[in-house]
Image (cartoon, helix red, strand yellow):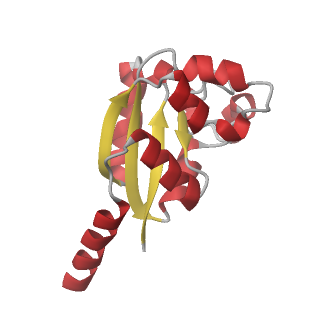
């Protein structure tokens, strides 16, 4: 079954044309890009987006960073999409990832645990929530109906 996930290319990567193009080419080769757009997160959206981290020491630094400039958001689709995107991103802790997963997106382009190049949903519920927050006009029901039609044709 096809699955959707939310992916975000963070501001420091979106500004870096070389890194951004590399990551986008990887996405295009591994996923169907259902929808994408440039987004500048307001503080309110960022607070909703990262609410599970509210009590953590890095929360304010994360909000400041993600609101610091344009990011690029995607809805990706593929089989096992969430796990696949998370594997390509690599672990969150960049200083370890550089050694343990040097070929991952974060291993190549991450600068710190906050400036770790990208974000991906950690499960189906967070994918729906994050997609709805950044792509409020996206209809999951319409997308599922289209997928069912394609499945029936095949």
Quarter of the rendering occupied by the C terminus: bottom left
The one of 139 and 10 positioned closer to us in this rendering: 139
Tell me the residue at 58%/36% (across/down).
48
Taking the spot 56% from the left edge, 42% from the top edge, the residue there is: 89
Report the quarter where the N terminus lies. Answer: bottom left
In the rendered image, the vertical position of residue 59 relative to residue 90, given as above or below: above
Residue 3 at what x, y percent from top left? 44, 64
> Could you say where residue 18 lies in the image, as x and y percent from the top left?
38, 23
Where residue 83 sits, quadrant-wise, is: bottom right
Dividing the picture into quadrants, the one containing residue 60 is: top right
Between residue 126 and residue 75, name the one nearer to us: 126
In this rendering, the answer to whether 25 lies above or below 43 is below
Q: Please report the residue visible at 36 percent of the width from the left and 21 percent of the height from the top.
A: 17
Residue extending farthest to the front is 44
Whether residue 25 is visible to the viewer of this picture, yes or no, is yes
Name the image quarter holding residue 15. Answer: top left
Q: Is any part of residue 83 visible from this angle?
A: no
């Amino acid at each position: 079954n096809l699955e959707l996930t939310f992916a975000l290319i963070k501001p420091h990567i979106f500004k870096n044309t070389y890194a951004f193009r590399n990551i986008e080419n990887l996405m295009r080769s591994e996923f169907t890009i259902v929808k994408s757009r440039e987004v500048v997160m307001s503080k309110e959206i960022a607070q909703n987006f990262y609410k599970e981290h509210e009590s953590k020491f890095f929360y304010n630094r994360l909000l400041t960073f993600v609101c610091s400039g344009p990011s690029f958001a995607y809805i990706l689709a593929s089989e096992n999409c969430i796990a696949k995107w998370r594997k390509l991103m690599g672990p969150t802790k960049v200083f370890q990832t550089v050694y343990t997963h040097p070929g991952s997106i974060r291993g190549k382009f991450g600068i710190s645990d906050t400036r770790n190049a990208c974000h991906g949903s950690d499960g189906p519920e967070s994918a729906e929530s994050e997609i709805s927050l950044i792509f409020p006009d996206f209809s999951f029901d319409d997308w599922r109906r289209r997928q069912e039609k394609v499945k029936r044709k095949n």
